[in-house]
Amino acid sequence: MKALAGYHPAVLFFYFAAVLLTAMFVRHPVLLAESFVGAILLFAALESRKQFFSQLLFSVLLALAVTLTNPLFSHNGVTPLFFINGNPVTLEAVFYGAAIGCMTASVLLWCRCFQILFTGDKLMYLIGRPLPRVSLVFSLTLRFVPLFLQKRREISQAQKAMGLFGSGSISERAHSLFRTCSALFDWSLSYAMETAAAMKARGYGLAHRTNFHLYVWRRSDSIFLIFSGMTALFVAISFARGELRYAYYPAAQRFWEQPPLLAGAAFLLLVFLPSFLEIKESLKWKYYVSKI
Amino acid sequence: MQKKIKRRLLRTVFCFFAALFAVLGTLFFDGKYYAFVSLILALLGCAAFFFRLEKRQAFVGELVLLAVMTSMTVLGRVLFAALPGFKPVTAIVILTALSFGPEIGFLTGAMGALVSNFYFGQGPWTPFQMFTWGLIGFFAGILRAYLKRYRPALLLYGAIAGMAYSLVMDVWTVLWWDGGFFVSRYLAALLAAAPYTILYAVSNVVFLFLLAAPLGKKLDRIYRKYFSLSEE
């Protein structure tokens, strides 16, 4: 179902870096709105319905909270709505709050999408060439976490069988947990040294090692990269020319009078590209299923 | 040998202060890209240690031990997931640094943040979490002679580390939202996070108090048995 998960890790990384940087550091309301809608669409395409709605509710609440609290910190602006304790609550402050609320919510959603698509093995593949040792540590860690969790279960079961594992009061349980973890520590440290000896014996650190991976560069990767690279470049050019500068204070600029056409259109394409691919894929899937 | 380590340490410390001054510098110059600059600096700070690990002479056991201690921090976050804020992660990072020195301390903290966020959610905070946890381990490693000798100093360090963690993370939120440092917003963020800040500090002290002797003993034994010779 996930059409994007099949793309090359470098392409995915580039795409999310471009989108996240723009979503985090460009303050133009048009781009913020595009980023928010795009993030919601992609998240809807990637997540189960239940997860989607709970996260969407959280995002909206977060954005609302930032919007409503911003006037407390900032009394800038020329359009006072009403006064609290003699301090004005201005329209501009509410608008700026809504903008950074939207920005925060959309960045969190983009990060969730990134996490779903960019799994640990992809990160390992990407850093494997420039940072082989770090990627080794990373891969060992990903293996150790479930291994140690399982080992902890085994230890606590053994202790229960020996009648050592207290399950009564909190202090008893804490004591048992402490003893289990102590044994786990001992075991894992000696396991580490055994692993190191085994790796050394098998020639870790010799030259001409290769890495296992399943990623190949396809034509679709090139197309995706060129498309997202071009659109990101247009956004960057527009940013460098100062077209994306936007003043919320003292009076919010009227962005519809001088809309950033180039960056707005390019970012729109960039943001909707993955959701478009996901929706296309799922329609294709439904079509083939219907033919069976 | 000792001299070489000291020189290496000095160089690393110097790099840190250079980075710190760069951040302070952006606060005085008009640029409004503090959030961006600090994000880049956090990434560069982590990258410096990662590249250092690649370049220097390291024996395999060091890498595997790093992986074990990293998975222990992740395990600490998983096992105590029911108690928000009450985690042994920082305590484990500090104890690792006490036995194995600043570099392993930094790497354990940074990798622990990176890997555990694969379980708990990545976000714009990931680079800063990596960097802050790394720094907590790094400074614990530098001060290890004192922290090992004086138990109260160790507990104090844990409490400070727990609070510093919150303080640093909130700085970035303010920089990011306002494009500048607004004291009122920062104070509000601190106030909102205060229960967590206190919980971090308390949990660090509790776990350090409980783990320092038994875990430190185990780690020191491994260090003496496998590492003390390989450093020559």
Image (spheres, coloured by chain):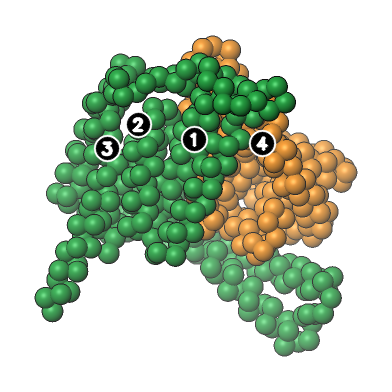
Q: CB of mark 3 within 8 Å of CB of mark 1?
A: no
Dot in front, 3 or 2: 2
Which chain is represented by green in the image? A
Task: Identify the residue under disc 2.
Answer: A30
Element under disc 4: helix
Task: Identify the residue under disc 1.
Answer: A98
Question: Quarter of the image containing the N terminus of chain A?
Answer: bottom left
Dot in front, 4 or 1: 1
Task: Identify the residue under disc 3.
Answer: A268
Task: Identify the residue under disc 4.
Answer: B189
Residue type for callout 2? Val
Image location of residue A141, percent across then percent down: 52, 58
Residue type for callout 1? Ala
Dot in front, 2 or 4: 2
Chain letter of disc 4 in the image: B
Real-space Cα separation, disc 3 to disc 1, in angstroms: 20 Å
- The residue under the point 58% across, 51% down is B112
Please report whichever mark, 3 or 1, sits nearer to the chain's N-terminal start. 1
Q: Tell which residue pokes out farthest to the left in this image.
A: A291
Real-space Cα separation, disc 4 to disc 3, in angstroms: 33 Å
Element under disc 3: helix
- The residue under the point 27% across, 28% down is A263
